[in-house]
Image: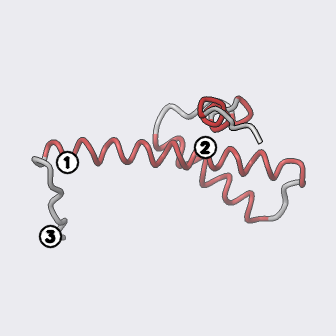
Amino acid sequence: MPKVPSSAASSAATSPDTGPLPASYEAGLQELEQLVAELESGQLPLDQLLGSYQRGAALLAFCREKLQAVEDQIKVLDAGSLKPWTAE
């Protein structure tokens, strides 16, 4: 069985089927929440379920990447260590 090149696997994750990614984390999160509600409602036709699931997976990855980037920036600003949050 031939191996699939890694570039083909990564291009599948960003296929045009999922559409363009949102401009911001907030927009991505809002769209993701809407998709989850639609999926959980059970009202989507079968042919739309897979596309909605794929879009949700792409949005989830986008939101995680944005959060990780912010966390990395905070670590740099806090000299490499996150400080515990305390409520006032």
State the residue at coordinates (74%, 57%). Answer: 38
| Residue 88 place in picture, x, y as percent | 14, 70
Q: Secondary structure at mark 3?
A: loop
* Residue furthest to the front: 1
| Lower sequence index among marks 3 and 1 | 1
Q: Which mark is residue 46?
A: none
Q: Amino acid at mark 1?
A: Lys
- Residue under label 3, please give it: 88
- Residue under label 1, please give it: 75
Q: Is residue 1 above or below residue 81?
A: above
| Residue 69 place in picture, x, y as percent | 34, 41
| Residue 71 place in picture, x, y as percent | 29, 48
Q: Nearer the viewer, residue 60 or 29?
A: 60
* Label 3 crowd (10 A; few <14 / some 14-19 / many >=20): few
Q: Left or right of 74: which side holds 25?
A: right
* Label 1 crowd (10 A; few <14 / some 14-19 / many >=20): some
